[in-house]
Amino acid sequence: MKVLVLLAEVDHFAHWEAADDDHRARVVADFTAFDEAVAARGRVLGGEALAPASTARTVRAGTDAASRAVTDGPYAETAEQLGGYYLIEVDDLEVAVELVRLLPREYDVEVREVVDVSF
């Protein structure tokens, strides 16, 4: 099963900029532990850190391509900032939830099954 793991934190980018070397080393160690644990029970298919939400552009719904407005910023204004994601492949959602507990404790983590929409 493919699972998308979204990592969010309130004021994520400000926290990272203010972090000292010890904090940054612990966060990197947590990510490494997660990567190794996923490799032992499945696969990491992808993952990246994201730029700040202020750099995002959102294409809004419309009746056709020409009517879709583009706005600056994320699709939803929230205190949490999406800092990155993983796409992993594991046996089931319970395994994914178990594994994401290894990620840095500062993050709220959304775990969502990827639906196969191939025709």
Image (cartoon, rainbow, N blue to C red):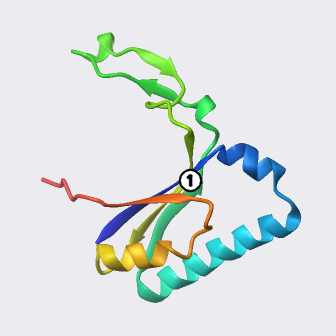
| Residue 70: quarter of image | top left
Q: Compared with residue 119, is residue 1 higher up or lower down, i.e. above or below?
A: below
Q: Compared with residue 22, is residue 59 higher up or lower down, i.e. above or below?
A: above
The one of 92 and 88 positioned closer to us in this rendering? 92
Q: Compared with residue 114, is residue 27 higher up or lower down, i.e. above or below?
A: below
Provide residue 46's location: percent of width, then percent of height: 49, 63
Q: Compared with residue 66, is residue 17 higher up or lower down, i.e. above or below?
A: below
Provide residue 42's location: percent of width, then percent of height: 41, 82
Q: Which residue is mark 1?
A: 84
Is residue 112 shown left or right of residue 55? left
Q: Amino acid at mark 1?
A: Gly
Specify the quadrant that holds the N terminus: bottom left
| Residue 72: quarter of image | top right
Provide residue 93's location: percent of width, then percent of height: 31, 73
Residue at the top extreme? 67
As helix, strand or loop, the secondary structure at mark 1 comes to strand
Residue at the left extreme? 119
Is residue 67 shown left or right of residue 75? left
